[in-house]
Amino acid sequence: MNDDAFVIDVAGVNKSFNGKRVVRDLDMQVRRGEIYGFLGPNGSGKTTSIRMLCGLLTPDSGRGTCLGYDIIRETAEIKRRVGYMTQRFSLYEDLSIQENLDFMARMYGMPNRRQVVTDALQRLGLTDRRRQLAGTLSGGWKQRMALAACMLHAPQLLLLDEPTAGVDPKARRDFWSEIYTLAATGISVLVSTHYMDEAERCHRLAYIADGRLLARGTPQQVLEAAGLTTWSVEGEGLQQLAAQLRDLPGVEQVVPFGATLHVSGTDAALLAQSIAPYQASADYRWSAARPGLEDVFIQLMEHAQDNGA
């Protein structure tokens, strides 16, 4: 594979379970050294997509390659070169950190196993805790150990399925610092997440709902493509105001943001016309707001639900 090739390049990929189609015509391309965010609500098909990409599930139809290997015919080669970090902690809680990593190195059949484990412990700051049982670790340290385990065989691609769910903000920040370090060495990362601050850290994004890819591009491109106009309003009685605004023409979403509401729509003129009487009220303070990814993804999710209905 040359340096300019996609490490993931799939098109028209589909998967069904018991007659239910959970991934629909997935198209995705991920470049070398890129951090690619994969977003969508629970049950949207993210995990199924990731498992097809790393050779754990076979697509019903479609075509594609991962690291230059065919995702249907060459899954064994893909598995040897991909690091996959699952949603749930999947290592042995009654073994120490070092014992877990040593076991994983044995599973990979790695030569010079002890040195590989020692290097992994040092790289992720686990050396001082190497004898601690995995079951006694906090969420952040478990996450760090899981990352060390899936990096043992020096993968060229990391597939991370909601890796920071349930860990504290500092652990999330430290984790992302490590991801940036890995990407800078040329490792590609496909990461699914529910956190908007993490989405904004990705080089490019894809948003999936009901198995369909609804948006993709850089964070800025996704924001621009949505075409949202957003207003922020603060004041007393925002809950009552929200109820009044939701049914107005041009108002597509009304979402609480801390002590404010975000009022958004894709028809800027119609939205402005509908909220004008409320802007004239002294009870509320209105200001134009820059739409965020959360505004965009709420809109995408609601449209997907409407289409499904």
Image: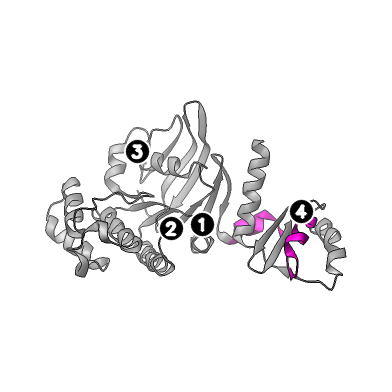
The residue that label 4 is drawn on is 246
Which one is earlier in the sequence, the residue at label 1 or at label 2? 2
Which quadrant is home to the C terminus?
top right
User: What's under tag 2, amino acid-wise?
Assistant: Glu
The residue that label 3 is drawn on is 56
User: What's under tag 1, amino acid-wise?
Assistant: Arg
Disc 2 packing (10 Å; few <14; some 14–19; many ≥20)? many
Cα–Cα gap, marks 1 and 2: 8 Å
Report whether 14 appears left or right of 267.
left
Q: Which mark is residue 204?
A: 1
The answer to whether marks 4 and 1 mark residues whose Cβ atoms lie closer than 8 Å is no
Q: What SS does tag 2 mark? A: loop
Out of 6 and 112, give the one closest to the viewer. 112
Residue 52, position in %: x, y? 40, 39
User: What's under tag 4, amino acid-wise?
Assistant: Arg
Out of 154 and 200, give the one closest to the viewer. 200
Residue at position x 70%, y 64% from top?
261
Which one is earlier in the sequence, the residue at label 3 or at label 2? 2
Report whether 44 appears left or right of 245.
left
- Name the mark nearer the viewer: 4 or 1: 4
- Name the mark nearer the viewer: 4 or 3: 4
Which one is earlier in the sequence, the residue at label 1 or at label 3? 3
The residue that label 2 is drawn on is 34
Residue at position x 62%, y 62% from top?
292
Cα–Cα gap, marks 1 and 3: 24 Å
The answer to whether marks 3 and 2 mark residues whose Cβ atoms lie closer than 8 Å is no
Residue 305 lies in what quarter of the image?
top right
The relative height of residue 67 versus residue 186 in the rendered view (above or below) is above
Cα–Cα gap, marks 3 and 2: 22 Å
Residue 66 lies in what quarter of the image?
top left
Residue at position x 18%, y 59% from top?
98
In the rendered structure, which segment of residues is drawn in magenta?
Answer: 220-245
